[in-house]
Amino acid sequence: MGRSDASELLPGTLDLLILRTLAAGEMHGYGIAQRLRQVSEDVLQVGESSLYPALQRLLLNGWVKAAWGASENNRRARYYTLTATGKKQLLSERAEFSRVVGAIEKVLNMA
Amino acid sequence: MAWLKTWRKIAFRWRRRELDRELAEELEFHRALKQQAVGDLSSIQMGNMTLAAEECRDMWSFLKLERLLQDMRYAARMFRRTPGFTAIAVLSLAVGIGGNAAMFTLVNTLLVRPLPYRQPDRLVRITGIFPHAAAPFFQQRERTMDIAAVSPGSEFNLSGAGDAIRILASATSANAFSVLGASAAMGRAFEGAEDSPGRDGVLVLSNSLWRTKFGGDPSVIGRVVALNGIHRQIVGIMPPTFSYPSAQVQAWIPMRLDPSNFLEYWGGEFVPLVARLRTGATVAKAQLEIRPLIDEFRKTFPYPMARDWNHDSTPIALQRDLTGDIRGKLIILLCSVGLVLLIACANVASLLLSRATTRRKELALRVALGAARTRIVRQLLTESVLLALVGGGLGILLGTGALSVFKSLLPSSTPGLAEAAIDWQVAAAVGGLALLTGLAFGIAPALSASQVNLAQPIRTGSQRSTAAFWTRLRGGLIGAEVALTVVLVVSAGLLIKSLYTLSEVHAGFQPRQILTVRISPNPSLCTQRPACIALYDRLLEGARGVPGATESAIADAVPLDAEQPDLAVDVEGHPKSADHPAPMLWAGAVSPGYIRMLGIPLLAGRDLADADGPKAAAVILISAATAKHFWPGENPIGRHIKAAGEQQWRTIVGVVGDVRQYSLSKAMPDWIPGALYMPYAQAVREDGQIPASMTLLVKTRANSDGAAREIRTLAQDQDPNVPVGQVQPLEEVVAGSIANFRATIRVFISFGGAAILLAAIGIYGLVSYWVTQRTYEIGLRVAIGATRARVVSMILGQGLRVALYGIAAGVMASLAATRFLASLLYGVGATDPATFTAVTALVLAVAIAATALPAWRASRIDPIVTLRVE
């Protein structure tokens, strides 16, 4: 047991993770994937085929917005930022996630 | 939020290409960074970028709609690739759906849609006909209904407004319009006591007469015109939707209810009664009430009436009464057109089924590539529904054409017929029908195709072990189609045979080379008998001078022209009583020479002669049927007959052959035992007057084209105030009397023809499919020594088995179904063995022809080629 593909997480979790990552500030797709890997110490590896559809979903829902800007190596990259509704969504999804995880904990810890 | 999302999706469609490019750039950027970090990058590490891009795009699309559009595009492409299949399927459906659209329209307009009057469900007709006296009698006594009398209409000369014309006007009691719940579009209908003598000088115009004769001028209200020379004031104009008692009635006049005019009040024209049920009354209650009242009314007649007179009169719904005659015909046509649709559906289903089977390989490939089974079913259903909708659209176009044909099959006097047009309701019903058909005939092929075994079709390339069930279903469909075809063709056959029998009927007269023209002076001209006699003498004199004319005559009614000069008579030696009321005879007023000119055989005695003038002793001729009815086995010459109520007897001087006066199919109505002929100079009508309207008949030599014009000019020159009809050959009059019947037959022939064609296509398709399916097997058989003849007979046998089952079922179904046609048949039984045999042979021949081509193709199969392919 080492690494886990983010697409196999609980439904909606990937969206939550992306929203949380973006809460720190604007970031491009590759950056989001890298950040998730670093923070989770290589446990969460997000594949491109789940990351970009998830970003599109967030865009469509109006939780993030995208803008083109220059990257660290001076290439054109698309940067994503959290919108006001995205922040609200993050809060409510985070609460929901805690509730579900708490419930799962309770089941696993039963006598 | 949902709408915002939808909006973003819609906005996306404008910037689609741009966003696609952005996404590609973004992914490329990602790949570049990753490659930098990891070094060498295999495709596995990179993940499926195509799928990611695909998924991103899907995210922005209206997926269901996109799929539907995609399915439809795909279906359209399939149709373009197989134009023959598409054309056959669409045309079959268009024919079926078009016919149904037209029939739905008629049935909806005539049978379903309520009459355009207030509370039409409260309107009833009292069956039977009654003298004018009945209207006030029942109006005073009825508690459950308000009763009105409305005559079916008779012809009048309308003058005082340009050229005199002949119009059909209905006489109604003053309350008729209020009972019907209809009011005038302009002016007013009749009011109060306008049916009493002295107040009845009024007239209401139909919309069509107002437009054609008065140019739609609103100021005609209040104008005075003359009907048969009697002045009447136009008081109102009805709306175009009002067509009671028939669409041919052009005007309404008050029915004179004058007890002092004995003849008109009690005799004269008997008229139908209509009524509106009062609040709370039911048809049953009304019926209980009317029976004793009719008995009571019968006793008030000033002359004896048959004891069972109007014994079975009963209130029936007015709509039913109006459509009574055509109801059966409509239903028969509706069933037939339904059968054609069924056949078309069976055909298309069978075509789709075979196509689904030949497309197994393609479908299997799609399943292998990850298409869900539901997606495949949806794709196939989309195809069939699209097919049905295109067929339905074309069908509505065809339907408008078919509607005018169907309309010509029904009497043009039917109220509401002229307004029948395909409306949105029918279009919606047809659309629904098309969808339903599409789903119904699409579902079997779709299910059959979705059961593909993944590996097998791809491996072997063709399908040798087909699902036996679907093949059997297909055989069943074609068998059913053949059966339905047999039913339709048998019906058409029976009708054709009826027409043939009818055309062979000896009508009792010779119509060739006789021209007729109707001349209708005002009856007032003929109150002076000599004036009328002189008019027609002049006319006959003039007719002799027409170039090409050989003979001429006049008659108040010529055979089959719908004039019915019935006369109640007293017959010598046959006294009247309550059980034997005055007999009615067809009483023609003719000039001497008429009998000879029409080639009616003189069986005994002498013909009428010029000497039988107004002053001479009254003489008549009688028909053979009259002679047989009153004097069976005796010599009628020298016996006497007179019009009921007349003083002086008329002596029978001759007996002539029977003539089909009323219709080609029937000698005489049941209540008329025969005919008599009076010399015009001595003639009387029911009202005691000499007939005013007469038909001039002129026999011409062949090829005298100008004669018709000459005759009309001659008639018009007599008096400009006398309306003159169109000159018509007598043969046309005869043909016109069965025009409806001919049209009905044409429709059945086209139904039958369409059915046979569809069935042939169905059988051909089925057998070709078998041959394709079994190419390998046949090749193998030939390789191991089967002869060509053997192969042909094998395929023929298979095709014919289906056809024979179908024919057998069809014959059974026809035996049960054709008795509903009985009312349309003439001189042929509903189960006529000759027709059944001929139709069976015909359908079998078509089946053999349709099987022969694929069988022949099967026999050309080259075993080496086939076996190598596999």
Image (cartoon, rainbow, N blue to C red):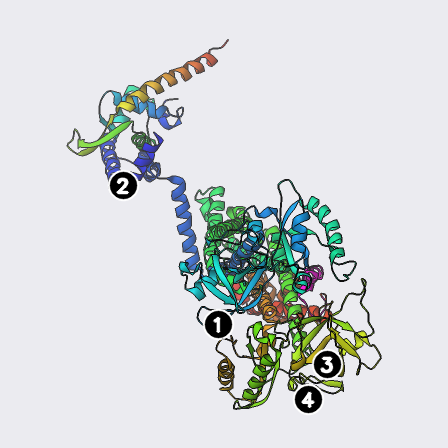
Where does residue B299 sit, x and y in percent of width and height? 76, 56
Q: Which residue is mark 2?
A: B20
2 or 4: tag closer to the N-terminus: 2
> Please, what is the three-letter code of the amino acid marked with disc 2?
Asp
Q: Which residue is mark 1?
A: B164
3 or 4: tag closer to the N-terminus: 4
Label 3 Cα neighbours within 10 Å, binned few <14 / some 14-19 / many ≥20: many
Residue A9 on the magenta segment: no
Residue B827 on the magenta segment: yes
Point out which mark residue B313 bears: none
Span colored in magenta: B808-829
Classify residue A55 as left or right of residue B541.
Answer: left
Where does residue B251 sit, x and y in percent of width and height? 52, 61
As displayed, is residue B838 above or below residue B4? below
> Please, what is the three-letter code of the amino acid marked with disc 4?
Ala
3 or 2: tag closer to the N-terminus: 2
Q: Which residue is mark 3?
A: B620
> Do tag 4 and tag 1 residues touch (Cβ < 8 Å)?
no
2 or 1: tag closer to the N-terminus: 2
| Direction top: furthest residue | A111
Q: Secondary structure at mark 3?
A: strand
- Cα distance between the residues tagged 4 and 1: 35 Å
Classify residue B6 as left or right of residue B646.
Answer: left
Comparing B95 with B764, the one in front is B95
- Cα distance between the residues tagged 1 and 3: 34 Å
